[in-house]
Image (tube, rainbow, N blue to C red):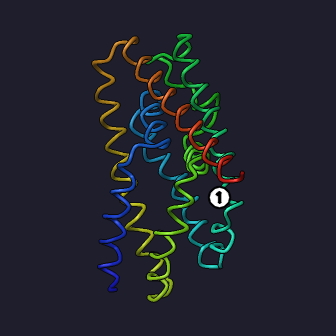
């Protein structure tokens, strides 16, 4: 596969994955309301730093650990618990009226920066790790045939897809914010919080079931 083809396929595959609903999408919407457009790129920065470290790990043989059923079960349970924590905090603050469109300085989850949030939320999603242990590993294998240049081109295509999508989500949230009332805003965050709670319960249940 040529470098151009590697970049193009990594971008398309990354874009299709980025557009799937998940924790990072929910947090991007939430943080964009609070912090403005910069939230999307900053979340992707944290997400990208984590993925860069994971690519290095896969190159060095981390797949042998990721493929272990016990590891996958543990990731599902721990990730689910983190999502429950994030979802509960988001829903509770929205219900209690502690979140306001005017309160731009309030950080994610009581002070967490968007870059750190991008890392934590990515780690909390078991399917993110499973994707990298399967599809991602296949791409890394292909990219390694082109050496370091192949890995860099693959990562560039992949992270550019994430940056494009989540920047668009942030822009849409910021634009919509101009016509949203406080009630509608809090309602959106309530839905996002409940979504994370449901996802967290599903991951915990899936992880426990796999271990019994």
To which quarter of the image does residue 159 belong? bottom left
Residue at the spot 56% in from the left edge and 40% down from the top edge: 202
**Helix, strand or loop status at disc 1:** helix
Q: Is residue 202 above or below residue 48?
A: above
Percent x, y of residue 22: 45, 43
Residue 112 lies in what quarter of the image?
top right
Q: Is residue 91 left or right of residue 175?
A: right
Q: Picture coordinates of residue 84 (x, y %)?
A: 62, 33
48 sits to left or right of 212: left
Q: Which is nearer the eye, 157 or 62? A: 62
Circle 1 crowding by C-alpha within 10 Å: few under 14, some 14–19, many from 20: some
Where residue 78 appears, as percent x and y from the top left, is 69, 45
Q: Residue at x 56, y 14 (%)?
A: 98
> Which corner quadrant holds the N terminus?
bottom left
Q: Position of residue 55 (x, y in %)?
A: 56, 70
- Residue that appears at 67% across and 38% down: 81
Q: Which residue is mark 1?
A: 72
Q: Count the marks.
A: 1
Depth check, front residue: 72 or 149: 72
32 relative position to 55: left or right: left
Q: Nearer the viewer, residue 74 or 182?
A: 74
Is residue 172 shown left or right of residue 118?
A: left
């Amino acid at each position: 596969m040529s470098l151009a083809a590697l970049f193009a396929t990594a971008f398309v595959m990354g874009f299709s994955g980025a557009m799937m609903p998940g924790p990072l999408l929910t947090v991007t919407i939430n943080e964009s309301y609070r912090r403005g457009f910069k939230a999307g790129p900053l979340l992707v920065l944290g997400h990208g730093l984590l993925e860069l470290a994971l690519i290095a790990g896969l190159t060095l043989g981390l797949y042998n650990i990721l493929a272990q059923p016990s590891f996958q079960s543990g990731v599902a349970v721990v990730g689910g618990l983190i999502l429950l924590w994030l979802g509960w905090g988001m829903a509770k603050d929205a219900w209690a009226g502690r979140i306001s469109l005017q309160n731009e300085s309030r950080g994610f989850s009581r002070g967490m920066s968007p870059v750190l949030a991008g890392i934590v939320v990515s780690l909390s999603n078991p399917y993110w790790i499973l994707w990298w242990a399967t599809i991602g590993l296949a791409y890394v294998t292909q990219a390694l045939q082109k050496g370091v240049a192949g890995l860099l081109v693959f990562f560039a295509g992949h992270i550019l897809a994430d940056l494009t999508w989540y920047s668009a989500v942030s822009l849409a949230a910021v634009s919509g914010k101009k016509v949203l009332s406080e009630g509608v805003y809090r309602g959106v965050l309530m839905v996002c919080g409940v979504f994370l709670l449901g996802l967290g319960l599903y991951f915990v249940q899936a992880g426990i079931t796999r271990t019994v």
